Amino acid sequence: MKPYIEREEEQHGTGRKFLYRTFHLDLVDEELVWHRDKKNRSVHVLNGNGWQLQLDDKLPKDLTIGQEYYIPKMTYHRVIKGDTTLVVRIENI
C-alpha cells in the first residue's frame, strides 16, 4: 500500500498532466522508503510543515510551501515525515 493518496489531473489547454499526492500524519515512518523514479520530476509543495526531501548522498532539505524541487530520474530519494499533512503536485518532465 502506498503512503499517500493520489489523484491525476490534466491542465486544460496544455496537455500537461500533474499528480497530486497527499501524505497524512497517520502514516508510519517506515512507509516512506528510499526509491527512484523512471522520469525526471518537478515537485511543487502545496501544503505541509516540517517535511523534508533527501536525495541520495545528500543531506535532507526542508520542503517549503510554494517551492519547486527537482528530482533527476533514477536518483534514490525519500521523504521524511513532518508535522502537518503534506500535499505536493508532481510533474514528470
Image (spheres, helix red, strand yellow):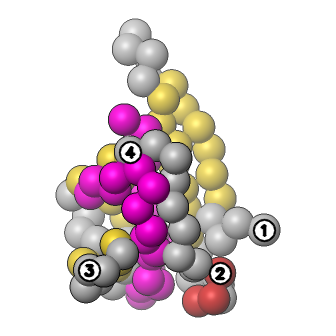
Labels 3 & 2 near each other (Cβ < 8 A)? no
Marks 3 and 1: which is nearer the front?
3
Q: Label 2: few (<14), some or many (≥20) within 10 Å?
A: few
- 83 part of magenta stretch: yes
Looking at the image, is mark 1 or mark 4 earlier in the sequence? 1
For label 1, the residue is 1
Lateral position of residue 75 relative to residue 24, left or right: left
Farthest residue toward the top? Answer: 13
Image x and y of residue 19, in percent: 52, 43
Labels 3 & 4 near each other (Cβ < 8 A)? no
Image x and y of residue 71, in percent: 34, 56
Labels 2 & 1 near each other (Cβ < 8 A)? yes
For label 2, the residue is 31
Mark 3–mark 2 distance (CA, rounded to whole Å): 20 Å
Q: Label 3: few (<14), some or many (≥20) within 10 Å?
A: few
Looking at the image, residue 10 lies above or below residue 33: above
Q: Quadrant of the C terminus?
A: top left
Looking at the image, is mark 3 or mark 4 earlier in the sequence? 4
Q: For the point 44% across and 83% down, which residue is it? A: 80
Labels 3 & 1 near each other (Cβ < 8 A)? no
Mark 2–mark 1 distance (CA, rounded to whole Å): 9 Å
Residue 33 position by quadrant = bottom right
Mark 1–mark 4 distance (CA, rounded to whole Å): 23 Å
Mark 4–mark 2 distance (CA, rounded to whole Å): 22 Å
For label 4, the residue is 40
